[in-house]
Amino acid sequence: MDKQSLLKDIEAHRRKMVSQASHSSLSNEKVIILSKKLDNLLNKYDRLIKNSSNSL
């Protein structure tokens, strides 16, 4: 996955999580699942950035 599509995916998941939390609560199971998915995407992005900077 390239950097731009990963950033779009991160932003989409962030919006979904915020929307879900605004209709329920931060402790709602769906919000927690979305938060974990967002964490995974952010970790993936971090690894991608670190790997690309190491190869320079």
Image (cartoon, helix red, strand yellow):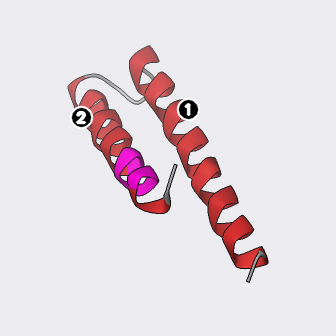
Mark 2 / mark 1, whichever is N-terminal: 2
Residue type at tag 2: Ser
Say few, some or many: other residues with alpha carbon within 10 Å of mark 2 (under 14 / 14 to 19 / 20 or more): few
Most frequent secondary structure within the magenta stretch? helix
Q: Which residue is mark 2?
A: 19
Splitting the image into 4 quarters, where does residue 31 fall?
top left
- As drawn, is 6 to the left or to the right of 43? left
| Label of residue 16 in the image | none
> Along the line of sight, which residue is nearer the eye, 44 or 16?
44
Q: Of all residues shown, which one is farthest toward the bottom?
A: 56
Splitting the image into 4 quarters, where does residue 50 fall?
bottom right
Q: Quadrant of the C terminus?
A: bottom right
**Magenta stretch?**
5-10
- As drawn, is 39 to the left or to the right of 28? right
**Residue found 45% across the figure and 16% down from its top:** 29
Please tell me whether residue 7 belongs to the stretch shown in magenta. Answer: yes
**Residue found 56% across the figure and 50% down from its top:** 42
Say few, some or many: other residues with alpha carbon within 10 Å of mark 1 (under 14 / 14 to 19 / 20 or more): few
Question: Disc 2 versus disc 1: distance between alpha carbons?
Answer: 15 Å
Location of residue 28 in the rendering, given as x and y in whole percent from the top left corner: 41, 19
Disc 2 on helix, strand or loop? Answer: helix
Disc 1 on helix, strand or loop? Answer: helix
Residue type at tag 1: Lys
Please tell me whether residue 6 belongs to the stretch shown in magenta. Answer: yes
Location of residue 21 in the rendering, given as x and y in whole percent from the top left corner: 31, 31
Up the image or down, 10 lies above or below 17; here it is below
| Label of residue 36 in the image | 1
